[in-house]
């Protein structure tokens, strides 16, 4: 149970292609986390800063002076209910940092694909109900499915790989393919799995969605000056493949991608939620230190408030 602490790490200066980005991590300590994170999300953000919080699994909240958005939020126990009594129970390893009903004034929710740990019905529907002006950015291939789920058409914005969406000044979203083991395209040429390159308040984030390396990925990313890569690092293996659990980047692959593209900062995620599909941070973090070179970051930290500043 957590709350924001006043103690801050020393700002980390990261040099990227277009500017210097200062990254500060604010530690969190024990307190009711759902209460405190909801309060943190309601606070104004100074000009020139982008604030970010990990929501668990592949989920993040981002806020700058003018925009508040969520990406792949899984904040319920939907999957534990769905898979109760099955081989993989999907019981949470970490509590949800806040309840979906507590989310207010969110402008955009980005979902990379329709799997429930990325587009959770028990998260997106309450958020949509309580934030009627919120826009849900989803793969166009899933528009009909999203309406069947209960989202209103007026709230949906479908994207396909290669498209860009700039709804307001200071926010640009570019979609590229994601290989969730494989690239899946429907008969209309629409991708079911996307990654998003989000430029928010002069900081550029790449969230790959569920993805592993594929031919052409580096070329698609090389046209963007990415400051922060948000990559799943739970990997893949024969056991999970035999149970139809698709895999993701390994840590080594994620680090290699960042180094090839001169991305200066990584936050590895998609761990610590389900016991059958995670990595052990006590093993992964030391390995990251061994292979990172000049790459900064590591595994994303729970209960941590990240501040990105270009000032």
Image (spheres, rainbow, N blue to C red):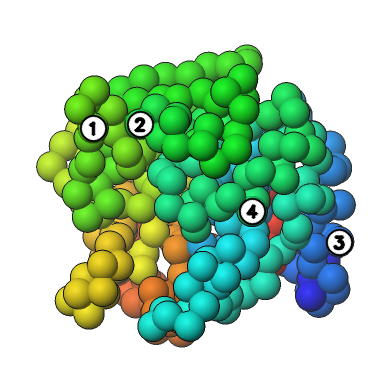
**Residue contact at pointers 2 and 1, CB within 8 angstroms:** yes
Q: How crowded is mark 2: few (under 14 residues within 10 Å), some or many (20 or more)?
A: many
Residue 186, labelled with which disc? 1
Q: Residue at (48%, 19%) from the top-left corner?
A: 165
User: Residue visible at 85% across and 42% down?
Assistant: 43
Vertical relation: 298 (above or below) 239: above
Disc 3 secondary structure class: helix
**Residue 114 position (above or below residue 226):** below
**Which residue does the numbered mark 3 point to in the structure image?**
35
Residue nearest the viewer, comparing 299 with 154:
154
User: Residue beneath label 2, please?
Assistant: 141
Image spot of residue 295 (x, y percent): 39, 56
Q: Residue furthest front?
A: 148
Q: Residue 278 lies in what quarter of the image?
A: bottom left
Residue 247 position (above or below residue 155): below
Mark 1 vs mark 3: give the one in front: 1
Residue 19 or 86: which is nearer the viewer?
86
Indicate the secondary structure of the residue bearing disc 2.
helix
């Amino acid at each position: 149970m957590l709350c924001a602490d006043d103690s801050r790490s020393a700002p980390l200066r990261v040099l990227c292609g277009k500017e210097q980005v200062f990254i500060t991590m604010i530690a969190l300590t024990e307190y009711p986390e759902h209460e405190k994170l909801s309060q943190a999300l309601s606070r104004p953000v100074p000009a020139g800063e982008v604030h970010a919080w990990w929501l668990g699994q592949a989920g993040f909240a981002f806020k700058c002076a003018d925009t508040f958005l969520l990406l792949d939020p899984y904040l319920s126990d939907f999957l534990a209910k769905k898979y109760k009594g099955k081989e993989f129970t999907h019981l949470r390893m970490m509590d949800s940092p806040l309840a979906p009903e507590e989310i207010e004034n969110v402008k955009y929710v980005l979902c990379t694909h329709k799997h429930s740990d990325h587009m959770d019905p028990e998260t997106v529907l309450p958020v949509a109900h309580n934030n009627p002006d919120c826009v849900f950015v989803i793969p166009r291939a899933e528009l009909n499915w999203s309406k069947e789920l209960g989202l209103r058409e007026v709230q949906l914005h479908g994207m396909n790989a290669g498209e860009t969406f700039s709804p307001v000044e200071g926010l640009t979203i570019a979609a590229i393919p994601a290989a969730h083991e494989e690239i899946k395209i429907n008969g209309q040429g629409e991708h079911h799995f996307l990654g998003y390159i989000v430029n928010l308040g002069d900081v550029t984030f790449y969230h790959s969605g569920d993805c592993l390396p594929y031919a052409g990925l580096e070329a698609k990313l090389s046209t963007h000056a990415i400051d922060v890569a948000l990559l799943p690092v739970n990997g893949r293996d024969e056991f999970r493949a035999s149970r139809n659990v698709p895999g993701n980047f390994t840590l080594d692959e994620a680090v290699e991608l960042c180094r090839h593209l001169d991305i200066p900062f990584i936050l590895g995620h998609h761990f610590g939620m389900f016991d059958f599909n995670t990595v052990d941070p006590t093993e992964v973090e030391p390995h990251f230190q061994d292979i990172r070179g000049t790459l900064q970051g590591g595994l994303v930290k729970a209960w941590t408030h990240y501040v990105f500043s270009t000032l």
